[in-house]
Image: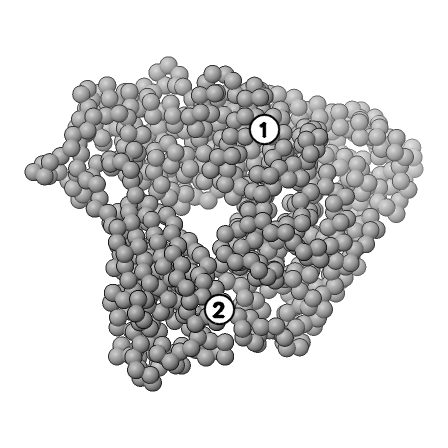
Amino acid sequence: MTRFFVLFILARTACAATLPPVASFFEKNCVECHDGDVKKGGLDLTALSFKPEDRKNFDQWVKVYDRVSKGEMPPAKKPRPEAAEVKTFQAALKTPLLGYELAQQAKNGRTVLRRLNRTEYENTMHDLLGISLPLKHILPEDTPLHGFDTVAEGLRFSQLQIEKYLEAADAALDAAIVLSKRPVGINQRYSYKNEQGIRKNLDTPPGTLSDKSNPKSGHRVMFRENDKEVVMFTTGDYLVGLRQCRPPSPGNYRIKVSANAFQSEGEPMTLMIYSTNKRKRLLSYCELPADKPREFEFTTRLDANDTIVINCDGVGRDKKGQNIYNVGAAEFLGTGLAVQWIEVEGPLSAEWPPASLKKALGDVPLTELGEKQKKYRDGKLLGYELAPADVKQAIASGLSAFAARAFRRPLDADEAAPYIALATQSLEAGSNFEDAMRVGLRAILTSPAFLLLEEHPGKLSDRALATRLAYFLTSSMPDDELMKVADAGQLSQPAELKAQTERLLKGPKAATFVTNFVGQWLELRNIEATTPDTKLYPEYDMLLKLGMVSETEAFFSEMLNQNLPVANLIHSDFAMLNNRLAEHYELPGISGEQFRRVSLPKDSPRGGVLTQASVLKVTANGTVTSPVIRGAWVMKRLLGQPPPPPPGNVAGIEPDTRGTTTIREQLAKHRDNESCASCHRQIDPPGFALESFDVIGGFRENYRSNEKGANVKRKLKGQNIWQYKEGLPVDASGELADGRKFQGITDFKKLLLDQQDQVMCALAGYLVTYGTGAGIQFADRDAIDAIAKQAKVEGSGLRSLVHAVVQSPLFLSK
């Protein structure tokens, strides 16, 4: 194509008319490939007009800007433009893109009106009404965008959503408005010796079957009675439920267990306590010493008629592989769980009627009903009766006060009138005070003012800022102190805002921020998306899965609490471990279920988030690892540079568990394709560095194989491993796109530390997205850089970064 013809074509586009320096850059460096023949370059720059009001067109121009800025275009094989030429191009294109988007933000704000997500809704209802009833499961799943379920664009309304909000509001009000007599609680010590099912299955003379066993199946008894305890050799939930104990009503209960590992040859075991009703739920767990009882206490919520189940993995089998079913409890020499007793106390309530009644209905006088004044509601005997002196006045004052708390701001004039009118109409139609109040409360709890966060374009008001800050750091409504500061108009003052941010970070609800942010940023919510192959990974169990997520949350919390540099995400000289994770990482000398900071040996491959089992599991499919998936995760989650999706005509890689082909050999075929190679040069190296870790995060030198390979030399729980074989050796070496080479994860992390500023910017962007409910736009990039630079000035600490986010214009404005 001649120079004259190129200029003729460009002159006809809006680009040439609006952005002459850009058109000149294209003509010199780009249109040889990116002309009307889209088969060559995939994009016709001669026909690309500049219409930023068209979102697709705007995004296309941003992509062009980014690829030139990163040096990806022109391609490496082509002549490189001069640095000054690139700078002129960037300025010429950035200015109109930035100008258009900033104008839109000034007019509409960065985020659209957003509603509470399921987690925020549940937490808000708990704080608003003083209840603990789970509600999240009632509502439809939220749709995450930009990686988070706090982003407004994904939080839409639907008819189903409205119906479920009504259902959830009714359930919450039922839990809050309690007028029954104080439930007769329980405070009792139980023994498994008194469990009827266990009494029938206690050990019998050696070599005989229990009278309740099935002779055809050959099942033998699995319990042994000693002087003060029952020893269990089974993990069957249906056998070890504490059916003597039935919680009389929903609420919080204190549970205390005395138990120990039995015949475990000095090895501790992990006790797990569940509740079962319609579903099985883990309540807590602890490490048990060998042959010495431990008393373990915790508080948890139980629903009426829940059954408590205690259990221990690894019981019922000895180190020789002998099974309890083959021997019987009397002769069995393998590991068991010895339980002395279980104490249950609850429901725990400091006052009755509960405080939730006043939170819902206001300070309404109550009349306690005597023994002869028997009144029932929904089959329950009432202990109290509401006795407002002026029913209509009580409705008006109660609903007005409740609406102000629910809407998280003072009410406008007559704003409560529609809700009061609904309740009054119900009252006049024959309803009593309670039912009339429920009508008004239900309307408030399904109103836009409650379900939506009220923010207007421009700088946030102090009350809107209080709401944004509270939902950012606690996933719930502002507490009284935060609202008091906001009402006084002081929250927007930098010093006061920093003080309130610090207070919330030190408070008990900061754990909610860690769980919800980290769980989505690092994709930990996908921990159960795949189940590791039981033959290839027989050591994987529920406690390891729980420990994986807890380790990463504890690590982030430690960085946040100690204001450790963000570079620790890449590599740290410590890990947060308990006994199960330490065993998995082959780090000896660590006992107990509590996570604590542990210094790592200098030659340890661990340290940072990349080598944590949670990350390594969510980036694998349960059978084999993929450098592509893991590499893409590193680029997106740690570096903030998500790779483009693969071409639709390229087939995925089928996992090979036979041990005949390595993943590196399979990926080599992809890199032979030039359309794949350009991306794989960026994606594959981080993934190759992580090949030293299997699908559950264990360190490895060889792949595991179902078929070919040598027998495994190490043991699992004292027994030889027969489920899999040692496959082909792992090669964790690689070369970055810029030519730097590494031999394994240690070398790779050293290279990655050179990009810690990029990691800081990426994390700042994710925090802003999560906290403001809007993805990062082109016009936000300079502000994100400013946040990262401010945190770097203060030592690059994670806590400093959170403060910099909160103080930034992005957080302070809609």
Q: Is residue 734 depicted above or below 356 in this figure? A: below
Q: Residue at x 37, y 32 (%)?
A: 128
Residue 318 is left or right of residue 774, and the answer is left
Residue found farthest to the top: 413
Residue found farthest to the bottom: 207
Q: Residues within 10 Å of mark 2 (few under 14, many from 20)?
A: few
Q: Residues within 10 Å of mark 1 (few under 14, many from 20)?
A: many
SS at mark 2 in the image: loop
Give the residue at mark 1: 806
As rendered, which of 690 and 426 lies closer to the eye? 690
SS at mark 1 in the image: helix
Report if residue 58 is visible in the image. Answer: no
Give the residue at mark 2: 266
Q: How is the image coloured?
A: one colour
Q: Residue at x 32, y 71 (%)?
A: 226
Between discs 2 and 1, the one toward the N terminus = 2
Q: What amino acid does circle 1 point to?
A: Val
